Amino acid sequence: MGQRISSLINEYGSGESCFFMTDITINRTDGFYDEPGESLSLGELHLFETPSLMERKSFPLTGVSRLQWEIRDAIEIPAKVDGIECIVKSKEAFDVAHVHLDCRKMRAEQSGHRYSCTIDTFGARMQLTLSWILIEIPSESRLTSDDAELAGRLNDEAISLTRRYEQTGELSDIDKAIASLEKAIELTFHGSINLPVRLNNLGTAYKCRFERLGELPVEWGDSEMQSPERTCQTR
């Protein structure tokens, strides 16, 4: 998954960690699907930071199937952003759905967890679900040269595991690759030239697993995603 780092704000406080939303998808989950020859047409996700609501960022939605769309960007959430207002747009630029994401609550959670929340639709008889993985990128001041060396080794190991998975189809290889990349990203400081590559590698590994199983890992199952600690509330 070719992910580019996109920022809501360009200035950051010194010594602060940064957070990224990765592996972002929108799924239709109501069970009432379109008639043959018809399909829901989603075009973009618009984001407004709170409390200011002044700056807007737009991200194209790419159709994976008639029931799923993905964002091929990793969205950066600086520490000064309290929340994000998300508007889902159709390809005809009509507002389809809205959800508020509580960034302060997300930052309080452990890095690497998958989040999921239902999106409020505007008058349509359907249900959309937004899901993503939150990754914390530590500041350079919190890391040592040993951390940087270990991060490089973990990334290289994950690349080898991903390539082996593509040749053998052994599911444990892609699971190990994901675990190695998550740890490598935790040990990569914000601003490192290696960060976009490692985020891209993680997105690729997630996509390989999803394409193989068509589902999330067991530890990201419905019971966890619906718990108060993992589910972002709408308003």
Image (cartoon, rainbow, N blue to C red):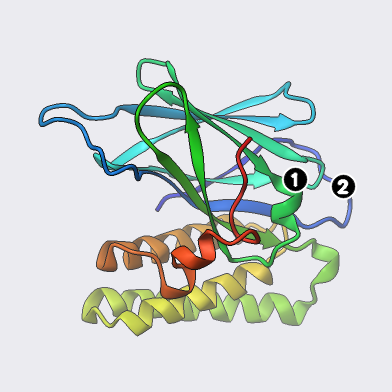
- Kindly identify the amino acid type of the residue bearing the numbered disc 1: Pro
Q: Is residue 35 above or below residue 233?
A: above
- Mark 2 is surrounded, within 10 Å at the Cα level, by few (under 14), some (14 to 19) or many (20 or more) other residues, namely few
Disc 1 versus disc 2: distance between alpha carbons?
9 Å
Q: Secondary structure at mark 2?
A: loop
Query: Is label 1 or label 2 in front?
Result: 1
Residue at (75% x, 45% y) in the render:
78
Q: Residue at x 38, y 23 (%)?
A: 90
- Of mark 1 and mark 2, the one earlier in the sequence is 2
Q: Position of residue 64 (x, y in %)?
A: 29, 45
Q: Residue furthest right?
A: 14
Viewer-side residue, 129 vs 140 = 129
Res 78 label: 1
Please identify the quarter of the rendering in which residue 129 is found.
top left
Q: Are marks 1 and 2 in contact (CB under 8 Å)?
A: yes
In the rendered view, tell whether residue 224 sits above or below residue 131: below
Left or right of 217 in this view: 21: right
66 versus 213 height, above or below: above
Picture quadrant where residue 203 is located:
bottom left
The C terminus sits in image quarter: top right
User: Which label sits on residue 13?
Assistant: 2
Q: Position of residue 40 (x, y in %)?
A: 28, 29
Q: Pick whichever, 84 or 145, lies toward us.
A: 84
Task: Point out which mark residue 235 bears.
Answer: none
Residue 31: % across, % down:
27, 44
Does the rendering let one see residue 191? no
Query: What residue type is disc 2 on?
Result: Gly
* Dot 1 crowding, Cα within 10 Å, few <14, some 14–19, many 20+: many
In the depicted structure, whether residue 233 falls above or below residue 160: above
Report the number of discs.
2
Q: Residue at x 73, y 53 (%)?
A: 105
